[in-house]
């Protein structure tokens, strides 16, 4: 956004969201077979096998099915909320749809640029929390969980479950 490339900025958020979704899915919901497919040495066969993994929506649904077992409700809630609010526009930016065409023709209003920034901060926060969980150290994960309320002014609003 700061470099004047809003279409690229929003498109990159889609890539970041899908990478975060996949990482959370691998932590919380993926089968051993799926993990093996993604861990295999890169061959044509392994590449084809990895293509048959679930979509982002399916991964989020699988994560949701494990809430209360191995998945914190907040993790699923944040993925779902981000997808619900941003998915259509992110797809439009990635695939050259109406959103980037209108933004190119009409400009990128400040309120939309600020929302993109808040969404990007939200993705970074979710990624940080995921990395904190991976450490297995509560001394790292607990402070990270307090980021959302402490920086609510520059993060997306959280909907109540």
Image (cartoon, grey):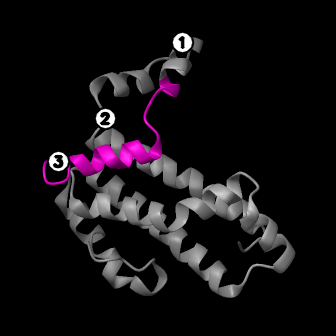
Decide which of tag 2 and tag 3 comes sooner along the chain: 2
Q: Is residue 109 left or right of residue 53?
A: right
Residue 30 marker: 2
> Splitting the image into 4 quarters, where does residue 143 fall?
bottom left
> Splitting the image into 4 quarters, where does residue 108 fall?
bottom right
Residue 54 lies within the magenta run: yes
* Crowding near the residue tagged with mark 1, few <14, some 14–19, many ≥20 C-alpha atoms within 10 Å: few
Q: Which residue is mark 1?
A: 45
Residue 63 locus on image (x, y percent):
29, 47
Q: Which residue is mark 3?
A: 70
Q: Nearer the viewer, residue 23 or 103?
A: 103
Q: Nearer the viewer, residue 116 or 127?
A: 116
Residue at 36 percent of width and 22 percent of height: 36
Look at the numbered disc 3 and give the secondary structure of its residue.
loop
Residue at 34 percent of width and 83 percent of height: 150
Residue range corresponding to the magenta coloring: 50-70
Look at the numbered disc 1 and give the secondary structure of its residue.
helix
Q: Quadrant of the N terminus?
A: bottom right
């Amino acid at each position: 956004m700061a470099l004047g490339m809003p279409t690229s900025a929003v498109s990159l958020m889609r890539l970041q969201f899908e990478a975060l979704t996949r990482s959370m899915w691998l932590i919380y919901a993926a089968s051993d077979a799926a993990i093996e497919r993604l861990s295999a040495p890169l061959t044509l066969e392994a590449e084809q096998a990895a293509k048959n993994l679930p979509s982002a929506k399916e991964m989020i649904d699988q994560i949701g099915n494990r809430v209360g077992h191995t998945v914190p409700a907040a993790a699923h809630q944040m993925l779902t909320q981000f997808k619900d609010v941003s998915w259509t526009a992110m797809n439009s930016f990635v695939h050259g749809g109406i959103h980037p065409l209108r933004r190119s023709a009409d400009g990128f209003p400040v309120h939309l640029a600020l929302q993109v920034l808040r969404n990007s901060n939200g993705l970074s926060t979710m990624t940080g929390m995921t990395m904190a969980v991976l450490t297995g150290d509560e001394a790292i994960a607990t402070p990270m969980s307090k980021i959302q309320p402490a920086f609510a002014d520059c993060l997306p609003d959280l909907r109540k479950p």
